[in-house]
Amino acid sequence: MAEARLAASPADTSPLRGFWQAFCENRGALVGLALLLLIVLLALLADVVAPHPPNEQFREAVRASPAWSEGGSMRFLLGTDSLGRDMLSRLIHGARVSLFIGLAVMGVSFVIGVGLGLVCVSFPGTLGQVLDVAITRAMDLILAVPGLVLAILVVAVLGPSLTNTIVAVAIVYLPRYVRLVRASALAELGKDYVTGARVAGVGPARLVLRTVLPNCLSPLIVQAALGVSDAILEAAALGFLGLGAQPPTAEWGTMLADAREFIRSNPWLVTLPGLAILLTVVSINLAGDGLRDALDPKMRRS
């Protein structure tokens, strides 16, 4: 019996198993993860799952009611929009576009933000101080402008498109990664293991990338997870204003903009894209909270 306990103990105390157990303590995070996985699966299999192509028009069924409403049919479970396009198909394909925007924004801002944050602390002497001040002041300037206003300004300069939406939103969320990496790296640089690495002759670049950065990843991972939902909301706002993804792209913000004139006569045209945005953002935030609790021992429940 004792030997069996000793054999099982390494697996029970492995970092991955401990992380999963801590994550599972948050029931809301499990619900959010399950819902998020369902949305991701629908997005990946949109071409198979969607009953119709997203831009196919059915002229005989313009603004058809959902199946549960009077006059609805099982052919269009969630009804059709003002051009006769199936709402369910457009919502499923819209999940692909919105998740792509969120992941692309997170990836771009994460990579550039981490690089700039490390530059702030990598160089010694006067050069390091100049770079640190220049980068931090540039980030402060970005933070001084409201995010949506800055995104609108960038898109207005570059032109409305899906690519420019990603660029604009990535610029808006860049400072949060730069400031987080800079603060975490400065805290780590004063610790004994960094001093030991310097005494051992480790160069500045390797010291920052191989020694300091891995110990700064936990808050960055949490910030990146939560940043996906923020990017989806920002992109939806730009799409609603006509500055994001352009028609006929099935994007949730654009679908809201197209349906706003029918908010009284056909309310489901506005309600369904809004619910899709809400469920996606809430699921990502719930999963991000669980990720934060699992990565931070202080947040774990006793």
Image (cartoon, rainbow, N blue to C red):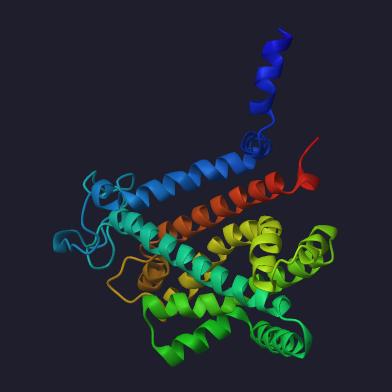
Q: Is residue 183 left or right of residue 38?
A: right
Relative vertical location of residue 221 with respect to residue 294 in this rendering, above or below: below
Q: Is residue 46 left or right of residue 2?
A: left
Is residue 221 something one can see in this rendering? yes
Specify the quadrant that holds the N terminus: top right
The residue drawn where x is 33% and y is 44% is 68
Relative vertical location of residue 181 with respect to residue 139 in this rendering, above or below: above
Q: Is residue 49 left or right of residue 36?
A: left
User: Number of numbered discs present?
Assistant: 0
Residue sitting farthest toward the top: 1
Specify the quadrant that holds the C terminus: top right
Where does residue 173 sit, x and y in percent of width and height? 59, 74
**Location of residue 225 (image quadrant):** bottom right
**Location of residue 174 (image quadrant):** bottom right
Q: Nearer the viewer, residue 297 or 173?
A: 297
Q: Nearer the viewer, residue 161 or 265?
A: 161
The residue drawn where x is 71% and y is 83% is 136
Where does residue 93 sit, x and y in percent of width and height? 32, 58
The residue drawn where x is 65% and y is 61% is 210
Where does residue 139 sit, x and y in percent of width and height? 67, 83
**Location of residue 186 (image quadrant):** bottom right
Is residue 268 something one can see in this rendering? no
Q: Is residue 209 left or right of residue 128?
A: left
